[in-house]
Image: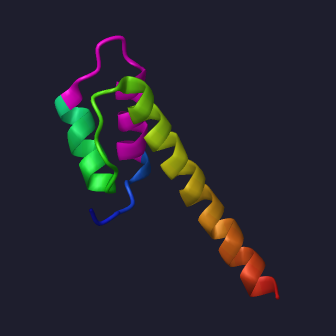
Amino acid sequence: MKQTSLAPDELARLVDELMKDEPDQKLIRSLMGKQGLPYSKDPITQMSTVLQSMDQNAAAPAKMKESNLT
């Protein structure tokens, strides 16, 4: 699946939905699909996948900055 970057408001919406006691799985599936993230019915896997993606996206600019300094 092709990964596209979610706008900050979409990412916040996805995280907010994942934090609910009874999240809307259709919305989660849609937002994860837009991000190119694999969907799982397991809420722990969903949150883990989203957090890993956020970590990778946050690390990418830092790596680019480091490579531009050398």
The relative height of residue 53 versus residue 15 in the rendered view (above or below) is below
Instruction: Tell whether 28 sits left or right of 19.
Output: left
Q: Position of residue 57 (x, y in %)?
A: 54, 59
Q: Quadrant of residue 23?
A: top left
The relative height of residue 25 versus residue 65 in the rendered view (above or below) is above
Residue found 72% across the figure and 76% down from its top? 65
Image quarter (top left, top right, bottom left or bottom right) of the N terminus: bottom left
Q: Residue furthest bottom?
A: 70
Q: Nearer the viewer, residue 62 or 43?
A: 43
Q: Position of residue 51 (x, y in %)?
A: 52, 41
Residue found 42% across the figure and 33% down from its top? 45
The relative height of residue 14 versus residue 54 in the rendered view (above or below) is above
Q: Position of residue 2 (x, y in %)?
A: 29, 66
Q: Which residues are magenta?
A: 9-25
Q: Position of residue 3 (x, y in %)?
A: 34, 63
Residue found 34% across the figure and 26% down from its top? 42
Q: Main secondary structure of the magenta part?
A: helix
